[in-house]
Image (cartoon, rainbow, N blue to C red):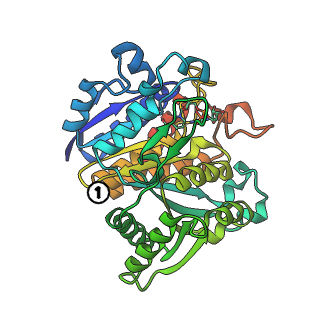
Amino acid sequence: MHKTIAVLAGDGIGPEITAEGLKVLDTVAGKYSHTFTCTHAPFGAGAYFSHGSSFPQETIETCDKADAIIKGPVGLSVDKMAHIPLEERPEKAAILPLRERYDTFANYRPIVLPPELHCFSPLKREVIGQGIDIMMIRELVGGIYFGEKVEGAQVENAYAKDVCVYNRGEVARIAHVAFKEAMARNKQLVNVHKANILATSRFWNRVVEEVKKEYPQVRYSSILVDNAAFQLVKNPTQFNGVMLLENMQGDILTDQAGGILGSLGLMPSACMGPLKGYVEPAHGSAPDIAGKNIANPYSMIGSVAFMLEKCFGLREEAADIWNALADVLGRGYRTADLAAAGTPQNMVLSTREFGDKVVEIIEKK
Ligand code: NAD
């Protein structure tokens, strides 16, 4: 197979973890005789300073031509971000336009913690039980993040407004994605909402429940988002299967799930649209550890596996990467964010060493 990939390494730890993702991609390409042509392009806060835009025209063109996009995290520390005008900050001027341009409405975020890795989690061992295995599916291009925004200018009677809108088509298509994913897993789906307050949530539930009729084998339930936040900490394994979330509620609960896993460095994700998708670690650019070769590249290497699986349909190749990632952790290796006090120094890997271990395992299998 030959595919073209736009690589937007981004800011902070982005370039370091992207290099490891590409190293693993190269290994898989060699092993399975695929050719992946990667083109790097500027994106994020660094792109604003070097090119005057967080999402420069040349990057848009590179992404348009590519079959898939690998995106690193973007953004800088709060004080450095203050030097970028609001309208040009990466969230507003790069991430949301990227999602909008390719209509990447379906965000997949696996929350996986096998029982033998329970020590990563701040939760007690008995709460982790037989392990956490949730696929959170978040709607990514609708709702309040994309609705009208108003900030009243006057000081007297000043106000602000964010409009949340969902239409039938937007809800139905993400519901189908979630039900299909549930069918491919343990056939359990939990729909998250705030229907006791929000009209958009009541509408969301009506449409999801219509779509549900097409998937009679799926065990379906729904839960208020506030209770879901509580239950995720108290008894996360009850959600093993698929959780379906709208955009803002999904933004918050997926990060909470990262906390349950013990590190945001364990969170890959894929954002899929009708024509193409992009993959990215679910965390930010971690300016506090950037350039130190200590970031956990799991999230980026897992995102590359996601690209192979979701964008190119290469399941065996993706499984090779997932297995190698599990193997590295299973053998007791840790990156700094995962290392508990007392972890022997020779088991704590740098960013590059972690990537090397994954490569070594893939090559040997
Ligand atoms: P962050 O996710 O960058 O970091 C939070 C904490 O997690 C930090 O302690 C960091 O060191 C740690 N961490 C994150 N990823 C890690 C990894 N791979 N390995 C080890 N530790 C890791 O959140 P933040 O500090 O609030 O944000 C920093 C910048 O990132 C901000 O400018 C923010 O706007 C931006 N951001 C971007 C995205 C994105 O690109 N999708 C998402 C969230 C935040």
Q: Image point 30% across, 55% down: which residue?
A: 314
Percent of width and height locating residue 350: 59, 29
Which quadrant of the figure shows ligand 1? top right
Residue at mark 1: 313
* Quarter occupied by residue 213: bottom left
**Direction from residue 171 to residue 354 in the image, left or right:** right
* Quarter occupied by residue 148: top left
Viewer-proximal residue among 152 and 288:
152
* Quarter occupied by residue 52: top left
Q: Image point 48% across, 33% down: which residue?
A: 73
Viewer-proximal residue among 344 and 134:
134
Viewer-proximal residue among 167 and 230:
167
Whether residue 20 is visible to the viewer of this picture, yes or no, is no
Q: Is residue 263 above or below residue 202?
A: above
Q: Is residue 334 above or below residue 51?
A: below
**Direction from residue 260 to residue 172 in the image, left or right:** left
Percent of width and height locating residue 147: 42, 48
Percent of width and height locating residue 146: 41, 47
Percent of width and height locating residue 352: 52, 28
Element under disc 1: loop
